Amino acid sequence: MKKRIQQLFKKSYKTIENDAFLKRIRATIIGEGMLHEGNIYLMDYAIQHMPDDGIVLEIGSYAGLSTNVLLHLLQKHHKKHTFIGCDAWIYEGFNDHTGNIETHIDGKAEVSRKDYVAYIKTAFINAAQLLHPNAKPFTCHMPSDIFFENWNSKNEFTDVFERTFSIQDTISFCYIDGDHSYEQAKKDFENVAAKLKRNGFILLDDSADYLNFGSKNLIEDIKNDHRFTIIDSNPNYLIQKVN
């Protein structure tokens, strides 16, 4: 009976065990439930095996949970890669897809979308400053399409900490967690693929087989893309560029 109970509660995906920071961070940063535990395992794998040079890129930051996990793993594995990110910080309501777009957040008419996303962005800044004061990410407030347009034009960026920077290298690992529609996920994937180093990695959020997001449908395309190989699904997919 005990064995049967253990089997019922056994996780169907691999996780990282015995990391005190990772246990504490979910109770520290807004966004609990938005980062699948299996993603952390795949992030850890990618960071350990990615090319020695290049940048780590994050598309979609929200309040900084995934950002600070990635920064922690980079430090844990003594990686010196520059961490860069972008987020549009646009509120997406539960019913927006129906065309019924309200000015307030779901279920709280007195809280405007504008105030809510300002709150989330401030939470991101506060979390990074608290947890990684000496390794803050170079995260920009802009949609991913605009981010890549600026990168391709070799423009200088200004991050949310009012620092200016430029990107001088290509990508070793990218975590794509932006707009999950098929069209935008494909744009993000192709933009990243064009700048991804050989043997570099992409982790595509919400791409698990049982989901119904555009990012899941994109994985079906990637499986037939000779440039990439599937490394793992846990349950979301980690892929590596091989050509």
Image: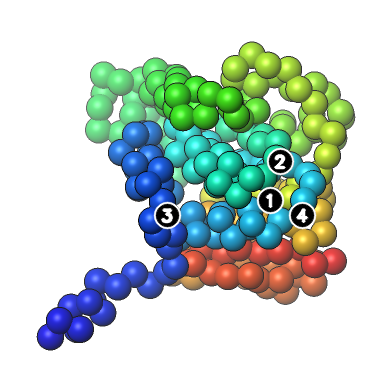
* Amino acid found under the numbered disc labelled 4: Pro
* Amino acid found under the numbered disc labelled 2: His
Q: Residues within 10 Å of mark 2 (few under 14, many from 20)?
A: many
**Whole-percent x, y for residue 121 in the image:** 48, 24
Residue situated furthest left in the rendering: 1
**Residue placed most toward the observer, 217 or 177:** 177
Q: Residue at x 58, y 32 (%)?
A: 87
Kindly state the secondary structure of the residue where label 3 is placed: loop
Q: Are marks 1 and 4 in contact (CB under 8 Å)?
A: no
Q: Are marks 3 and 2 in contact (CB under 8 Å)?
A: no
**Residue 121 in sight:** no
CA distance separating discs 1 and 2: 10 Å
Q: Earlier in the sequence, mark 4 or mark 2?
A: 4
Residue assigned mark 3? 36
Q: Earlier in the sequence, mark 3 or mark 4?
A: 3
Display colour scheme? rainbow
**Residue placed most toward the observer, 45 or 201:** 45
Q: Residues within 10 Å of mark 4 (few under 14, many from 20)?
A: some
Q: Are marks 1 and 2 in contact (CB under 8 Å)?
A: yes
Q: Earlier in the sequence, mark 3 or mark 2?
A: 3
Kindly state the secondary structure of the residue where label 2 is placed: loop
Instruction: Name the mark nearer the viewer: 1 or 2.
Output: 2
Q: Are marks 4 and 2 in contact (CB under 8 Å)?
A: no
From the viewer's perspective, is residue 166 above or below residue 186?
above
Residue assigned mark 1? 173
Q: Residue at x 49, y 67 (%)?
A: 234
Q: Residues within 10 Å of mark 3 (few under 14, many from 20)?
A: some
Residue assigned mark 4? 51
* Amino acid found under the numbered disc labelled 1: Phe
